[in-house]
Amino acid sequence: MCGIVASFGETINKEELTLRLNKIKHRGNRREAEINSGNNYFLGCQRLAIISPGSGKQPAVNEDKTIEVILNGEVYNFKELKETLSGHTFETNCDTEVIIHLYEQWGIEGFKKLNGMFAFVLWDHRTEEYIAVRDPLGVKPLYFVHVKSEDSITFASEQKSLIGLDGVILTLPPGHYMTQEKTGKYFYFDFHFEEFKADKLRYLLEASIKRRLYSDRSSGVFLSGGLDSALLSFYMKQFNSNVKAYSVGMENSEDLLFSKRYAKELNLDLEILTLSEDLIINKLPQIIYHLESYNPFLVRSGVGTYFASQLAAKNESVIFCGEGADELFAGYSYLWNFPFARYSALLKEGLNNLHQTELQRLDRMSMAHTIEAREPFLDINLVQYAFSIPVDSKIRPWESPLQKLCLREAYKGLLPEYIINRPKVPFDKGSAIDVVLHNHIYKEFSDKAFEAEKNRYTYMKSFNKETMFYFLIWKEFFLSASQAFVLDRGRYVNYDESSPEDIIK
């Protein structure tokens, strides 16, 4: 996991681009940024060394140094891929190097073989062409600005590194690649009908967790006392008896009560951070700065993720978390507001949007504390299976008030009944953070002040008081007069005016 900045054009200002790279210094644990540059290219990385920390370096290069690449993320199957790459010399045991040789051997088609979370930019000196690539689900971010007046393009892991450039900040869609000539899709899921089988679900989740255990650094797990985090804790304890779990919440909040109970029964080493109103409110501007969003759902859940990451980062370099389970297995109660016939399409829409909702929150809040988050539920094999089984194996509103029924069935007898039967509780509610934020906003932000701000920012008239409150903090960091932001649609990331192709067909 890292923070990357890449730029290509007729003239490259290395000093300016280094400053942009330094804006995301928190994403790496090296004293100095790692940079290669020339007259027409810049590749820079704030490296968080997780795999092969001693020998690995970025940008990685091929044998004759004609191809370079910078990577944010992890390629989980890089060892298997190395076995298929003949005629290449590997200088390191790092996953980044595999990307170059995949490209040399198979071109863009080779990127289909990658299993991981990644965003990378490759520069080919032979053709003087770049290729930017993002993983199939957009777990790792990649933004860019095309400055037409200079005929240049700059990529970055976070929007803050692109502020001030003369152009709109866009995001490369998941499963896509970009070159000078075109943007295309390299990865497609191929969903087909399959009966639900509990043993297959257990096998795929266990295999996903094992695949993500590879690291030269220590790993922990987030625990909220809900089904998803309890499952991960169950497996992590099996694979490492000394693993630590991390929980946050207000005193006597529901999440802390469930987490303490489960950790005690599992004999799991649990560290807890009990939050306070002062702590939350004082850190709120910093949280929104790192989050790069004023969306209230992301801010509320982002607060808990920020403090959980801060707590875990004292001991760990890698943290396991349950993001993606709700999208795969119908964990959201909002589905009940729609006819059952629409559930499948709504779940796919949620998966399509994950890169600009929960994954944006998780990436920014974890990397604010230089800790790598890994999401076993978002393994491409598990996603493929989850969207191939019937929707009524996941949710049956006519029969049960619970969601994620297939997960509960698969682990009945392996997890305690109070975990199996605990309803889905959003992180901000289970930790009681939502109450703290609500009370503060309605105490400090009067109706009169709210109306005045709506008149000042006319494109925000449809926003409620909470959203406006967060927006006023966000704008101090990001709303530059020279930057074109798409605010009138109420989106919390900037996006291309043309709708990106869906991840799922």
Image (tube, helix red, strand yellow):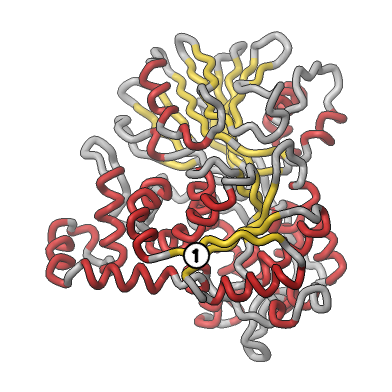
Hey, which residue is sitting farthest bottom in the picture? 399
Classify residue 438 as left or right of residue 422. Answer: left
User: Residue at 60% across / 31% down in the picture?
Assistant: 71
**As rendered, which of 309 and 149 lies closer to the eye?**
309
User: Residue at 56% across / 27% down in the picture?
Assistant: 30
Classify residue 170 as left or right of residue 117. Answer: left
Q: Determine the image quadrant of residue 166.
A: top left
Is residue 349 visible in the rendered image? The answer is no
Q: Determine the image quadrant of residue 386.
A: bottom right
**Looking at the rendering, in which quadrant would you find the C terminus?**
bottom right
**Can you identify the residue that label 1 sits on?**
274
Residue 116: % across, % down:
69, 43
When the figure is inspected, residue 265 is found, relative to residue 293, above or below; the finding is below
**As rendered, which of 284 and 361 lies closer to the eye?**
284
User: Residue at 58% across / 43% down in the picture?
Assistant: 371
Q: Determine the image quadrant of residue 225.
A: bottom right
Q: Residues within 10 Å of mark 1 (few under 14, many from 20)?
A: some
User: Residue at 38% across / 59% down in the picture?
Assistant: 279
**As rendered, which of 393 and 179 lies closer to the eye?**
393
Q: Amino acid at mark 1?
A: Thr
Residue 53: % across, % down:
68, 28
**Looking at the rendering, in which quadrant would you find the N terminus?**
top right
| Helix, strand or loop at mark 1 | strand
When the figure is inspected, residue 367 is found, relative to residue 387, above or below; the finding is above
